[in-house]
Amino acid sequence: MTKISGIYAASMSILNSDLSLNIEKTINHAEKLIDQGCHGTVIFGSTGQAQLLPISEKINLLNKLSDNKYNDKHIIGTGLNSLNETINFLKIAVSLNFKKFLIMPPAYYKYDDSDVINFYNKIIEAVPECRIILYNFEKLCGYKFSIKCIEELVEKFPKQIVGVKDSSYNLFEKLTLKNFSVMPGSEAKLLKCLELGCSGIITATCNVTAKIARRVYDDFIAGKDQTYNQKLINIRNEFDKYNLISALHTIKSKNNDIYKNLLPPLNMLDKESEDKLIQNLKKLDFQINPQMAA
């Protein structure tokens, strides 16, 4: 399997007014991100409200996505706490020719590295065809991967454990494993991570910064001077002042009202925060591309 590298967006899920998943528009949104410059997307990551969506809607989308022209460019998130539900979901996805998955350890419960290794062991025993990107995000699940834990997982499952999305940022500066993708969760880390030998990024704000992030990536690969990196960092820093999902949906709703639909307890930014975010983004010469509307 080719090493996963490049610019990946944690793609947004588009909901109908009744808060059901709009499968066609969600897929179209992901397609347009790739057209804008992303090497691929993560479907049903935390940005895609995966933890809040019914499994049945996720499966319905996978059935449709399996015929998509970019089906090999998508990583599938699970967003499930249940081990058995995760395994069943992966089996269905694999049957539809999806092999790459972003999987976070379960939230809420307290556990250590050995328990995490056992969790992934059970998944791989049941679905050996899977290729897993570990999701390191302590703020969401309460657990932070150690380098030792990842090294043990890769040693035990070299074919299945193929990378990590590092949104806790305790790994990307230190973790170096052969044929293993290390991908921070922020554009603000992109240039530094590439300089350190990391593979790229998986990030929420690439829903609106795909072109700029791809330019930074391509300029680095080509050895060119960086003329867009600081702008990319500044834009990410503005979004980081708010809940990312709320901020992204608020900005995207300026082109299409359908982005206002969020599953509770998520909500849109309040008017004061919205006005401040838009004002500060305009100062950065940030353009919302109308072609990115769902």
Image (cartoon, rainbow, N blue to C red):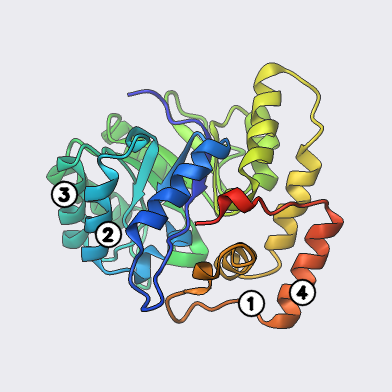
Q: Is residue 61 left or right of residue 164?
A: left
Tell me the tag on residue 275: 4
Mark 3 vs mark 1, CA separation in Å:
36 Å
- Location of residue 204 (image quadrant): bottom right
Element type where label 3 sits in the image: helix
- The residue that label 3 is drawn on is 92
Callouts 4 and 2 close, C-beta under 8 Å = no
Please report whichever mark, 4 or 2, sits nearer to the chain's N-terminal start.
Answer: 2
Mark 4 vs mark 2, CA separation in Å:
33 Å
Give the amino acid at mark 1.
Leu
Q: Nearer the viewer, residue 221 or 293?
A: 293
Residue 151, position in %: x, y? 40, 37
Residue at 48% from the left image edge and 60% from the top image edge: 47
| Whether residue 223 is situated above or below residue 12 in the rendered picture | above
Please report whichever mark, 2 or 1, sits nearer to the chain's N-terminal start.
Answer: 2
| Marker count (numbered) | 4
Residue 277, position in %: x, y? 75, 68
Residue 125, position in %: x, y? 14, 43
Give the amino acid at mark 2.
Lys
- The residue that label 2 is drawn on is 58
